[in-house]
Amino acid sequence: MIQQRNIAVCIILSFITCGIYGFYWLACLTNDANTVSGTNGTSGGMTVLLTIVTCNIYGLYWGYKQGEKIDLAKQKRGIPSSNSNVLYLLLCLFIPIVAWVLMQNELNNLAGANS
């Protein structure tokens, strides 16, 4: 269904490539969240484009919506969920890579629950 990613490798590659891998990771997070939640949201490529064009203003909205999608996916699987959308919004405002790490951890857990 979705691929589990090593979070440490994603962080290291994001720094080594000066953020270029971060854009790929952003696209993967978006596509994976759309897949696990069963929604047809904005695609990963469009998310990267809109985030760049709007100077990360769209990234704040994206972080909020990612929290909703991940919570929806957890509810569908009967896993207790919290309202993480506000947390992701605030983290995307101040330190986006931490929000991405938390999202990837949740997606890895959801991918492991499907196996």
Image: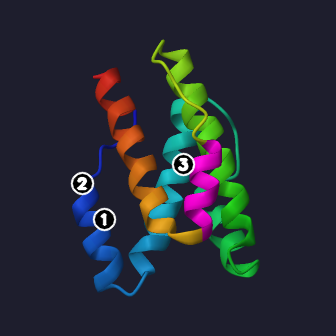
Q: Does the magenta stretch include residue 90?
A: yes
Q: Specify the quadrant of the image occupied by residue 13.
A: bottom left
Q: In which quarter of the image is the N terminus?
A: top left
Quickly name the residue at label 1.
10
Q: Residue 31: which disc?
A: 3
Above or below residue 99? Residue 16 is below
Q: How far apart are marks 3 and 1 (CA)?
A: 16 Å
Q: Residue 53: which disc?
A: none
Q: Distance between the residues labelled 2 and 3?
A: 17 Å
Above or below residue 32? Residue 51 is below
Residue that appears at 34% across and 85% down: 17
Residue stretch rendered in magenta on the structure:
85-93
Residue that appears at 55% across and 29% down: 82
Residue that appears at 28% across and 84% down: 16
Residue that appears at 44% across and 66% down: 97
Question: Which of the two discs, 2 and 3, labels the residue nearer the N terminus?
Answer: 2
Q: What SS does tag 1 mark?
A: helix
Q: What SS does tag 3 mark?
A: helix
Q: Residue 72 in the image: x percent, y percent?
A: 60, 27
- Amino acid type of the residue that numbered disc 1 sits on in the rendered structure: Cys
Query: In the figure, is residue 57 to the left or right of 76?
Result: right
**Count of labels in the image:** 3
Q: Is residue 74 magenta?
A: no
Q: Residue 56 in the image: x percent, y percent?
A: 68, 74
Q: How crowded is mark 1: few (under 14 residues within 10 Å), some or many (20 or more)?
A: some
Q: Residue 6: which disc?
A: 2
Q: Distance between the residues labelled 2 and 1?
A: 6 Å
